[in-house]
Every structure is written in C-alpha cells, then in structure tokens.
C-alpha cells in the first residue's frame, strides 16, 4: 500500500483530498504545517492557525487517519517572510504563495514526509498531474484544474519534475461545489468553512499592517501623470507593430516606463512608497479627481508614487516583460527554448488573470514575453507563467 502525507490546512479542499486518497486505497497521514508564531511581527490579534490546526485535527479524527503538526516557522520566516520584506523594500511585488509552494510545501514539507517513508505528498490544490513519455523518459505534466474558476496551477508554476514526481492533487478533477458537497456528506467540520484569504498557511492578514511592522512609514509625494504625457508615446507607437516585426525592439516593449517628478503634478502625500505596487487603487486616500487614481510606478529611492487617473491609463498598460536568465524556470525542461528560438503560448502574470496570447523570445538577455495585446499592471517581482492549452510549461520572475 502506497503511503501519502496530506498537508491538512484546516480547509475544505485538503480535507476532501485526504478522504479521496483514503477511498483510493492509500495509507493516509494528515500533517498540519505551523508556519508562524513570531510575536515580534504580529500577523493578527487573532490566532487563525490555532483554529485551522484544530479543524485539521478534527478532520483527521473523522477520517480515522494519523495526524501530526510540523513546525516550519523558522524556514517560513527565512524563505518567505524575509523575502517579502526585502522585495517590497526594493519596490518590487513578490508572490509569497508561489514561493511557499516551491520552498515550503514541496520542499521542506516534502522532505519531512519522506522521513515518514511516504511515497507522495498531497495538497488540496485545484490542478492536475499527468504522466507522459519523452524520449523514453517519464515526464510529468502540470495541468490546470477542471474548475476554471478555481484553477490554482499558477501557484505551482515553480515546481520541478522531481517535485511533481512525488506530488498528488486529488481534487483537480472536481469543482469547488463538488468538493463542498463531499465534505457536507461526510459531515466534516470544514464543509462550510470560507476559503483563506491570507498568506500561505498563515491565515488572516492585512498586508499593509504586516509590512508596516518592519518597513517604517516615510512621508513622500504622490505625483499624478497625465494620460497624454509624452512618456507613453514611444511604446504606443511600438504597440501598433506585430511582434514579428519588432525583434530589435523587444527591450523597448518590455521596459517599464520611466517617470520623473517634473513630468506630473503633486496630487497628495503617502506614508511609504514601499507599501504600494503597480495597479493598486486602495490605500492612496486621495479624492477629488474625475476618475480614481491608480499606482503607475513606485520609486523607493526617492520615495515617490506615480499615479494616473482611471484603470485604462496608458501607464498601466505594457505589451511585454523580461525574465532574466537566472529566473527562467521550465516545468517541462524538454520544451525549453534555445537562444534565438520563440514559442507561441498563453500567459498570465497573476492568479485568476485570464490567459492571454503571447510569444516567448529567447535571447542572451533572457526570455522576453511579448503579449499580443497590452497587459495591465505588470510589476517587477511577480511571476509570469506560460501555458500551452491547459498545461503549464514554465514560469519566471519579472525583472
């Protein structure tokens, strides 16, 4: 009998994942990851992880499977929280959930499961895994979940073939309503529990409050850039060209707009440029404009936030991005591009964003991702993931 350790988070998805594996004949062990108990950086006045751990334990009791808690808070702080603070301090937009999966769930947690002589680890992610053969080698395909509204393959975009070989995703063929119905029929305590909106395996957290505990407020100016500013003229001209005609302009298409204080007018003040990210609307607390202000760029060195009116402001739209060589990751290494090659794909730069047609261009500078249509709020530090149909082929950190 194959043994599998399920990451029981205290939510309905992992609860049903454990049940399904048990029904399939696996020997199932439930394990709760305790990722945070550092009182020097308070997540919340509440203790959501205690509630989640208790729910996970009740699910294990109901299913009559062994249960234990593993403390990964040291690793989580070093590899996720410290990374978040460092990225925001540099004016970048990290995605801790992608890193949590790569560094914690499918690395540290996986190693702990292997010490229990497990054959696999399993999670409640809405995605699927298929096995194929390439040149006589077993190759794992990471596919989107059947529930398009809940597909979480993006969060796993940094996984390797070795990690996929040891991973199971039992609910990938189900929809969220089907998962809840199974939990309800089993009378699981998690059946009606709301999905967590917080950091990976931590729970409730307001990111601005969290950041302010180590990134201290510094008052600075909010500068408004007019939509007709000449800053945008160069790229707008390039946007009219099909990607086949602009190989020499890949760098121009993928470069962020460059702003300076004199290019706009002061619209107000903020409490720290490192708290904001491109495309953000909430938190500016500036009114009196015909259209809402959106963050176009942040300058953490000068502590300036550049904004523009309306969600269709040209400063929010870019056609391309660059992933530097060290940050390119192929889930399917057999499909990786060589210098000078290109590939037509579907891509997204954030979870839940609809996939958009794009072309990958491999060059010495890195991998250029050029979209057929301009994309909104491309921010350095985010992960871009590219797909062929419903298979996630690779990903990278936006430079």
Image (spheres, rainbow, N blue to C red):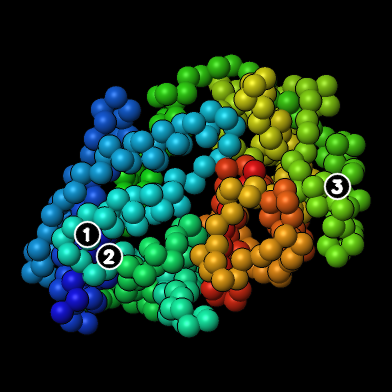
Q: Residues within 10 Å of mark 3 (few under 14, many from 20)?
A: many
Residue 189 in sight: no
Identify the residue under disc 3: 235
Secondary element at tag 3 = helix
Residue at (30% x, 34% y) in the render: 44
Identify the residue under disc 2: 121
N-terminal-most mark, 2 or 3: 2
Q: Say which of marks 1 and 3 sits in front.
A: 1
The number of discs equals 3
* Quarter assignment of residue 115: bottom left
Residue at (71% x, 70% y) in the render: 344
Identify the residue under disc 1: 113
Left or right, residue 40 beside residue 29: right
* Quarter assignment of residue 46: top left
Secondary element at tag 2 = strand
Residue 354 numbered mark, or none: none
For residue 203, above or below residue 140: above
Left or right, residue 353 beside residue 104: right
Q: Residues within 10 Å of mark 1 (few under 14, many from 20)?
A: many
At which x and y percent is residue 383?
A: 56, 51
* Quarter assignment of residue 288: top right
């Amino acid at each position: 009998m194959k043994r599998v350790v399920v990451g029981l988070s205290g939510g309905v998805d992992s609860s049903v994942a454990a049940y399904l594996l048990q029904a399939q004949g696996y020997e199932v062990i439930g394990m709760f990851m305790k990722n945070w108990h550092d009182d020097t950086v308070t997540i919340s006045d509440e203790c959501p992880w205690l509630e989640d751990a208790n729910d996970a334990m009740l699910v294990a009791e109901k299913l009559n499977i062994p249960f234990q808690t593993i403390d990964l808070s040291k690793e989580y702080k070093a590899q996720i929280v410290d990374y978040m603070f460092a990225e925001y301090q540099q004016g970048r937009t990290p995605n801790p959930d992608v890193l949590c999966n790569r560094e914690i769930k499918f690395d540290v947690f996986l190693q702990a499961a292997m010490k229990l002589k497990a054959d696999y680890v399993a999670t409640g992610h809405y995605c699927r895994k298929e096995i194929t053969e390439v040149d006589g080698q077993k190759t794992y395909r990471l596919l989107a979940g059947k529930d398009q509204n809940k597909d979480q393959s993006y969060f796993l975009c940094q996984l390797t073939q070795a990690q996929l070989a040891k991973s199971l995703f039992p609910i990938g063929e189900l929809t969220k309503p089907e998962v809840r119905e199974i939990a309800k029929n089993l009378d699981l305590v998690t059946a009606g529990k709301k999905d967590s909106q917080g950091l990976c395996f931590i729970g409730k957290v307001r990111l601005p409050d969290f950041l302010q505990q180590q990134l201290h407020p510094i008052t600075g100016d909010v500068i408004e850039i007019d939509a007709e500013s000449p800053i945008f003229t160069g790229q707008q001209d390039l946007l009219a060209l099909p990607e086949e005609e602009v190989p020499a302009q890949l760098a121009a298409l993928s470069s962020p707009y460059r702003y300076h204080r004199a290019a706009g007018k002061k619209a107000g003040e903020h409490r720290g440029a490192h708290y904001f990210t491109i495309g953000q609307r909430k938190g500016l607390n500036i009114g009196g404009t015909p259209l809402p202000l959106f963050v176009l760029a942040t300058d953490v060195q000068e502590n300036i936030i550049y904004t523009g009116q309306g969600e269709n402001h040209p400063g929010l739209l870019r056609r391309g991005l660059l992933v530097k060589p060290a940050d390119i990751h192929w889930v399917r290494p057999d499909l990786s591009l060589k210098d000078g090659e290109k590939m037509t794909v579907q891509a997204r730069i954030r979870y839940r964003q609809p996939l958009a047609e794009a072309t990958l261009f491999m060059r010495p500078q890195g991998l250029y991702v050029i979209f057929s249509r301009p994309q909104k709020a491309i921010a350095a530090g985010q992960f871009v993931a590219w797909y062929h149909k419903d298979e996630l082929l690779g990903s990278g950190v936006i430079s």
